Image (tube, coloured by chain):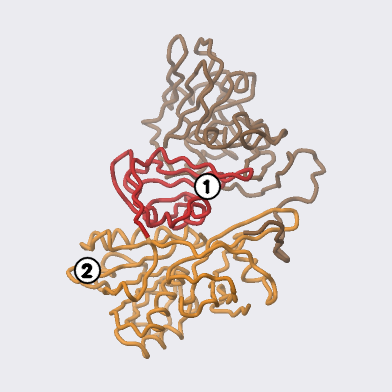
Chain colours: A orange, B brown, C red
Amino acid sequence: MTIRPETARTKSITLALPNWIGHRAGQHVDVRLTAEDGYQAERSYSIASPPEEAPRVTLTVERIDDGEVSPYLTEDLRVGDKLELRGPIGGYFVWDASMGGLLLLVAGGSGIVPLMAMLRHRAATSSSVPTRLLYSSRSLEDVIYRDELDHLVKNTTMLEVVQTLTRVQPPGWTDYSRRIDMQMLREVAWPVEQRPIAYICGPTPFVETAAASLVALGHEPARIKTERFGPTGEA
Amino acid sequence: MSEGFISRGFRSRRQKSDQSGRIPPGQYLERGFPVLSAGPTPHTLLINWDFSIIGEVDQPKRWSWEEFRALPRETITKDIHCVTKWSKLDTHWEGVSLDTLLAQVTTAASFVVAFCDGGYTTNLPLDEVTGGQAWVVDTYEGQPLEPQHGGPARLLVPHLYFWKSAKWVRGLRLVEQDEPGFWESLGYNNHGDPWKEERYWGD
Amino acid sequence: MENKLDGNAAAGALQAILPFDMTLVQATCTGCGATNAIGATAAYMHGMGTIVRCPRCDTVLIRIVHARGRYLLDMRGVRVLQIMEG
C-alpha cells in the first residue's frame, strides 16, 4: 500500500490486490471499516486508477469533516494496514476506449476521481477520442491531479481541460470563475449535432444542474451518464 | 467480505458504558440529529395541510393547520432511539397529544396506520398511542419543525424506535386488522421496543 | 437536504444479492411507465435500507433491507426488468 497526498484534503491510496479480477474506468469499490466492538461503517469510493494498472488499484479520498470513513482513510490509515473492500461495482457509469464517441466529462470537486480513471485509461490505450473535461473546484489548491492534467493535455492528442474555480481565483486567472450553469456548458460542451457521450460526477446538486443543462441544450438524455456523490461529496 | 476483520485504529461511535441507564441495548449517544431520508423531502404548504382520522371510526375527523394549532398543546421532553443505533436524550418538542385528537372520534378498532406526505406509513396498536404515549408535534427545540426532520408536523412515539415517529404525518387510519407499514413489511419488527431490542422480524 | 444519490450507489447492495450487474438492468416503473437503467434511477441510502425511485415520478421501484443475515428485496414498483444476455 502507498499513501500520497493530492491536495490538503485528499489522499490517494494505492493497494496491491492479488485477487483483483480487473475493473473498468468509472467503477467504484465499497470500503467497510469494522471497530473492535463490531461497529461498522461503509462508503463507496471511485477507483482513480485505470484498468491497465491492475492488480494495483488506487482510490482518491477526500476528507469530509464529519464523515465516518474518509477521516480514517485520510488521517489514520498507515502503510501496512489492511482494508476491507468489495468490488469492482457498477457497469453503468463506465467508459472504455472501445466505446469511442466524442467525450464530455464534467466533474465537481471529488467527482473528478472516476473521470480521471477514464482519462488515464484513454492515455494508456493511446486513444485519440476527442475529449473535453469541465472541472469545477473551489480554488486552485483544491484541484486534484492538477499537474497530471496539465501533463495529459500536453502529451495526448485531442484533450482539452477547462476549469472553473467557484470561490477563489488566482491573479491572472482566465478560465471560469463561477458555478457551472447552462451558459458555461453551452460554451464548453460539444455541439449537440455531434452527439457526444457525457459523464457527469460530483455532489448531487452539481450533477443535477449539469445534467438538466445538457438536456435543455438539446443533448440526448440516453447519452448522459451521471454519478452522484451526495450533498457533501461522500457517497 | 470476510467476518471477523477489524480495521486497525478505527474508533467506534458507541459509548463504552452507559451510567445513566437511559441508553437502550446496542445504542450509542448521538449529539447531532441525523437525517435519514427514503425519498424527496415533501414541502407541504400550511394552507394545504390537514390532519385526518379516518377508517373504522363513526365519523372521520379533519383539522386544518389553524384548527390543529388551536388545540390544547403540550411540551414534551423525551429520549429518542433510532434503530440505526443512535439515541438522543432530552429532545424537546411541542404539539398535540393523540389522546386529544382521538377523543374526537369513536372507534372499535385496535390498530392505527399513520399515513404521510410522500407515501410513508407505519403501524401501531391503538393502545400504544393513547394514554400519553404519542403526539403530533410541530415544534422541535423551540423552533418550527424543519421539513428535513418531518415538518410541518410529525408523529412522536418515543417509547418505540424512531421509525414509528412518522415524518410528514397527515393522519391516522384506524383499522381492525394490523397492517404492517413501510419498514414493518420489509424486515423491521412490527412492534419496535428499543428496550427489548425489537429491531427486525423474529426479534 | 436528503441524501439523494443514484443507482450506482445501490449497486453494491444489489450485487451482493443478484449475480449480475444491476446498474445496467432496465426497469419499467409501475407508476408512470418510464424505463430507465437502474444506474440512472434515484437512490436514497437511508440508514435502515436502500430505496430506489423512478427518476421521473419518484415511485418506489426497489427496496432493500439487509438484516440478521438475510436480504429482503421488494420490487413491487417494477413492472418489468430487462436483463441483457452475456
Q: Position of residue A29 (x, y in %)?
A: 53, 64
Q: Chain of mark 1?
A: C
Categorize mark 1 by other alpha carbons within 10 Å: few (<14), some (14-19), many (20+): some
Closest to the observer, C12 or B25: C12
Q: Element under label 2?
A: loop
Q: Quadrant of residue C75?
A: top left
Please give left or right for residue B78 compared with residue B115 in the image: right
Left or right: A203 as drawn, with respect to C46: left
- Depth check, front residue: A210 or B101: A210
Looking at the image, do the residues carrying marks 1 and 2 touch, with CB atoms under 8 Å apart? no
On the image, numbered disc 1 is attached to which residue? C46
x, y percentage for residue B197?
70, 36
In this view, the residue in front, A61 or A179, is A61
Amino acid type of disc 1?
A: His
**Which residue extends farthest bottom?**
A155
> To which quarter of the image does residue B4 belong?
bottom right
> Is residue B123 depicted above or below A109 in this figure?
above
Q: Quadrant of the N terminus of chain A?
A: bottom right
Residue matched to label 2: A195
The residue tagged with tag 1: helix, strand or loop?
Answer: strand
Q: Is residue C61 left or right of residue B26?
A: left
**Residue B38 x, y percent position in the rendering:** 48, 44
**Residue at figure coordinates x 73%, y 39% from the top left:** B24
